[in-house]
Amino acid sequence: MTIFIVAVIAFVSVLQVSSAQRVYADGTDFGLSISQPTQIGCTATYTISYIPYGGFMETVAETASGVPMATFSMGTFFLSVVTTDTLFVGNLSPGKTYDLTIVADSFGLSHSVTTVLTAPPLSDSDTCSNGTIGSGNGPIPDFDMAVNQTTTPEYAGGSSSVSYLLSYSSIYYFTGIVHEKVTGVPAQFVSFFNSRRVPSSGYCRIERSCEDVVTIYTAGLSAGTYSVIITATAVGGTPYHSVVISLTVP
């Protein structure tokens, strides 16, 4: 009975290890594996793990293909002990599926691993346009913006108005104030919960996240359908994001 239990535990352990995609080799060589991604909007972050075998001690160079833009934290490194690197992927198209391939080369000795990455679909409540990767070894700090209609009593202006919850979250350590505005309807019908002197102009201070509410008063608007654009812009003009909402006034 004891031998059977040990065998089952060993089998389960093997299944857990091989749940990640791995490439192994015998002799003086190295293997690599790729983690499941952490996705924010149209960006993704992976951890790449390297294991040397048989006393392997060489420089390894990494490349990525199959996605619009990608950058490694290291890119080239000396491998002699278990090592991890971070891969940032950005500029993904909403709803598109990519075959991401990572190739690790060391003086002609090459191994690769491929994984499938799907960006979330585009919707009115999520810009999915953030996460531009910079030219250096890392991404440009950015923020994610989502807009959802709310019926929270403290924000609702009555039957002649509609309110939207604006939610922001930091990407790659972005911090700062974003200025909010609405176009597509006259400014006198717009009011932000977080505003200073002008109700039609709002702001939100993003540390890790931030929320604001904008109310559009429809009583004075002519009947019809409006394309309402809500824009949030960081101090200095970049980054900025917009969400388009279709508003129908009966």
Image (spheres, grey):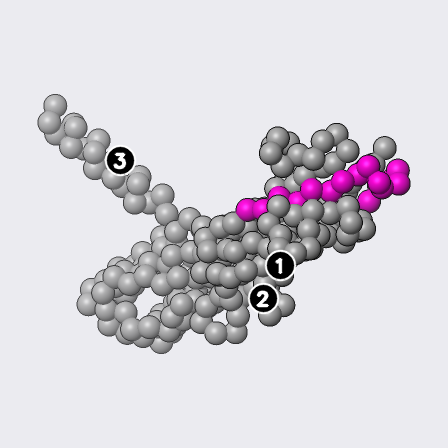
For mark 2, give the secondary structure: loop
Residue lying at 85% horizontally and 33% vertically, measured from the top left: 250
Distance in Å between CA atoms under marks 2 and 3:
52 Å
Looking at the rendering, the stretch of residues picked out in magenta corresponds to 211-227
Tell me whether circle 2 and circle 1 mark residues in contact (CB < 8 Å): yes
Rendered-image quadrant of the N terminus: top left
Expressed as whole percent of the image width and height from the top left, the position of residue 156 reads 66, 34
Dot 2 amino acid type: Val
For mark 3, give the secondary structure: helix
Tell me whether circle 2 and circle 3 mark residues in contact (CB < 8 Å): no
**Residue 177 appears in the figure:** yes
Residue lying at 82% horizontally and 37% vertically, measured from the top left: 219
The local crowd at label 2, few if under 14, some if 14 to 19, many if 20 or more residues have their Cα within 10 Å, is few
Q: Which residue is outermost to the left?
A: 2
Dot 3 amino acid type: Val
Q: Say left or right for 74 vs 184.
A: left
**Residue 98 appears in the figure:** no
Prevailing secondary structure class for the magenta stretch in the rendered image: strand
Q: Earlier in the sequence, mark 2 or mark 3?
A: 3
Q: Is residue 215 magenta?
A: yes
Determine which residue is flagged by label 2: 235
Distance in Å between CA atoms under marks 2 and 1:
7 Å
Q: Which of marks 2 and 1 is nearer the N terminus?
A: 1
Q: Say left or right for 16 vs 193.
A: left
The foreground one among 191 and 148 is: 191
Between circles 1 and 3, the one closer to the viewer is 1
Determine which residue is flagged by label 3: 12
Expressed as whole percent of the image width and height from the top left, the position of residue 136 reads 48, 74
Look at the picture and state if 157 lies above or below 70: above
Residue lying at 65% horizontally and 48% vertically, measured from the top left: 192
Distance in Å between CA atoms under marks 1 and 3:
52 Å
